[in-house]
Amino acid sequence: MIRLKDLSVSFKEFQLGPLHLDVPEGVFFMLMGPTGSGKTLLLETIAGLVKPDTGTIEVAGHDVTDNPPGRRSVGIVYQDTALFPHLSVRQNIMYGVRYSSNRNDYDFDVLVEVLDLRRLLDRLPGKLSGGEKQRTALARALITGPEVILLDEPLSSLDQMFKGEIRNELKRLHNETGTTFLMTTHDFTDALSMGTHGAVIRDGKIEQEGTIDEIFYSPATPFMASFIGMKNVFPVEFDGNLADIRELSVRHTFPRNGRGFIAVPPESVVISCTSSVTSERNRFFGTISSIEQMGASCSVSVDCSSFVIVSHVTRNAVIELKLTAGSEVYISFKASSVHVF
């Protein structure tokens, strides 16, 4: 596990922290955030490549704040792999062993079999594909048997075919080794397909942490809702189970009072052409202001006078309901689908 307490780092004009972060043992932890939010700096601080101004870093229950990189039981893999071009795959993998203080090294033969590197051991990095380079870099990081593997956007420079291949390799490797993985990414597909836990960092501070489901399906702040792509975020005045948006009231299931925000996932918004009785507690009349095609689905914006709400529906539904800009429709959604902040 990784535990960061009151950690802060000053780097040029940027301030990381102070922040607290707990990464449970054995999880696949995804660190997300906008460009320039401090993701790579945080990884390099955990790895010992950057010295913190304040705070402590614990790895597997040991305080490693003042330890050099080779005495932290941490391996790091960058997106460009940083392989030595003049060394073979075998030599690259074994390079770090001489500098490591760990005594639980992985068996070389087992590792190259797990990562399917046997036939590549005598090749130079210049003769490897993108996926083969990533597997070699992973082997070099794992050979010393670290408690933690840090991955700095390892898939960002790969095409889609290689991304799928490396995602599968990372998931399998994590499951087989039980090592704690901490990976930075901009790609939500990475987080949703591989991650079990995660955090979002913003301007050097942790915005939200928890399980991947909590982050993507229960955003805690308006920024989080916006960051994960959740549309329909509105400022409201709460009155118990009602959230007032100008003259309209939205029902929700989290009683509170005062000002705040709500968010309604577009997938939860149902469009109909008639005012039929449904189980949804929220039902409003509006006019379609725009329809945007998104592959097999469409994003339909409906102006309800007090707010414009977006619904995601299939292209077939748009055709069957004969929806066009200017169409008058009813939108509905359940109270339980409303997120409150």
Image (spheres, rainbow, N blue to C red):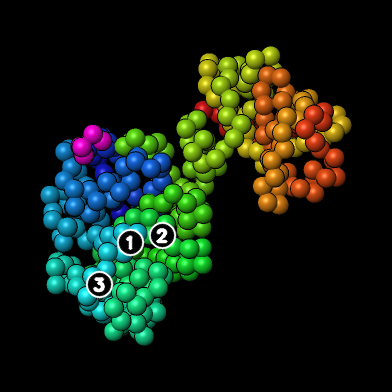
Give residue 257's position: percent from left, percent from top. Answer: 55, 17
Rounded to the nearest whole Å, what is the CA distance between mark 2 and mark 1?
Answer: 8 Å
Residue 61 in sight:
no
Amino acid at the residue labelled 1: Asp
The residue sitting at 41% across, 59% down in the picture is 157
Rounded to the nearest whole Å, what is the CA distance between mark 2 and mark 3?
Answer: 18 Å
- 293 or 135, nearer to the observer: 293
Q: Residues within 10 Å of mark 2 (few under 14, many from 20)?
A: few
- Residue under label 1, please give it: 80
Circles 2 and 1 in contact, beta carbons < 8 Å: yes
Q: Is residue 99 left or right of residue 338?
A: left
Amino acid at the residue labelled 2: Ser
Q: Is residue 252 left or right of residue 274?
A: left
- Residue under label 3, please give it: 85
The residue sitting at 22% across, 76% down in the picture is 87
User: Which of the marked residues, 3 or 1, is nearer the chain's N terminus?
Assistant: 1
User: Which of the marked residues, 2 or 3, is nearer the chain's N terminus?
Assistant: 3
Residue 68 in sight:
yes
User: Which of the marked residues, 2 or 1, is nearer the chain's N terminus?
Assistant: 1
- 220 or 169, nearer to the observer: 169
Give residue 333's position: percent from left, percent from top. Answer: 71, 33
- Residue under label 2, please give it: 157
Q: Identify whether 278 is placed above or below 307.
A: below
